[in-house]
Image (cartoon, rainbow, N blue to C red):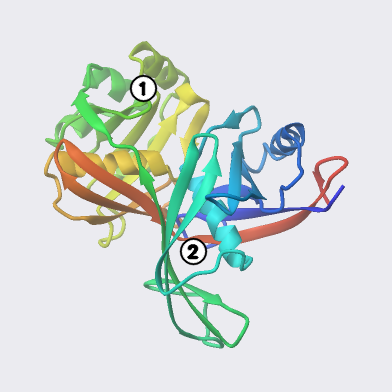
Amino acid sequence: MKEIILKRIDVFTTNPFCGNPAGIVTNADGMSTDSMQALAAEMKMNLIEMAYVSECSGKSDFSVRFFTPDKELEISGHVMLAACYALIEEGRIKLSEGMTRIPFETLVGTIPLDVYFRTDYESGTDGNENKSGLRLDSGQGRGGILEKIMISQPRYSFTPCDIPVEDIAEVLGIDAAEIKSTGLPFVRASNEIDWLIIPIRKKETIATMRPDLIKLGMLNRKYNTYSNQIFSLDTFDSSCITYSRNFSPAMGLWEDPASASGSAGLGAYLRQFDITGSDSMVMQQGNETDSLARILVEVGGKAGDISIRVGGLAVKSIERKINPASMELV
């Protein structure tokens, strides 16, 4: 059996071991479903989600399958971004000046990612990144700057939340006034699933939040909601529009360090309720305030018909060989 290379790619950051990690195998051609699931299960203490990339023919050059330690997923936004970055780093995706659209085959059909790149970097310059992107070396004395990788998200609809504010505040371990005093809508956001979008007055309240996740999961299931995007307009970085954390115990995920879907829904919410007129927003997310993810959300359209893309940058933090017989790190 061929050698398997596993990469840890950290998404929504350019700093290793920050952002949201994903495990990526870019040479998964010929791997069985059982082998993919076995490796995902083996990595459960280190990586919650993994992707396996294979070459294919037709509309796309690559197909991607997504796994948690317990099951195969149809798709995962941040893991898709990680897979795309890993292929770019290997030189298997050829980038043109400006935007290059890369289609990937998934269980839900063909998903395009838009990669933005500019060729104005001379190799040999110190550092790995600058304020507008991540430096890539072509290996031929010249390189360029990867500006962003973006993926489109489903449209969201919003309805007033039927959960009493006092009930959600109790399981979050905060005073209900932290929600009510924002003057912002507490709503249910819907696309494939229903989310709660919960405004909080102060960033410190979110950063120090220790919710009862068992009770939060029970409350979510009672009201047929699956995730909780908890945000504040009070941020740790003036260049960012929101600071947030995401808890999804009803889906088996205690905390998502950087949620593509949650941020997309939050961006649509900010436009829907005229909280901002910006077309491009940077959102902070995470519980470690010195290593927060930076998620780029781009919105278009108007209330009731809002299109949305989410993305940013990524970086490789670990690369290891896998024993194909045992599915363990070598």
* Callout count: 2
Whole-percent x, y for residue 287 in the image: 43, 45
Whole-percent x, y for residue 191 in the image: 33, 30
* Residue 205 location, quadrant: top left
Q: Is residue 44 left or right of residue 105?
A: right
The numbered mark, 1 or 2, whose residue comes first in the sequence reads 2
Distance between mark 1 and mark 2 Cα atoms: 34 Å
- The residue shown at (61%, 40%) is 65
Whole-percent x, y for residue 95 in the image: 49, 69
Q: Which residue is mark 2?
A: 14
Mark toward the viewer: 1 or 2:
2
Q: Residues within 10 Å of mark 1 (few under 14, many from 20)?
A: some
Q: Secondary structure at mark 2?
A: loop
* Residue 211 location, quadrant: top left
From this view, report whether residue 11 is shown above or below residue 127: above
Q: Which residue is mark 1?
A: 171
- The residue shown at (60%, 46%) is 63
Q: Nearer the viewer, residue 3 or 114?
A: 114
Q: Label 2 sits on what residue type?
A: Thr
- The residue shown at (33%, 49%) is 309
Residue 244 is labelled as: none
Q: Nearer the viewer, residue 189 or 177?
A: 189
Q: Is residue 234 visible?
A: no
Q: Nearer the viewer, residue 139 or 70?
A: 139
Q: Label 1 sits on what residue type?
A: Val
Q: Residues within 10 Å of mark 2 (few under 14, many from 20)?
A: many
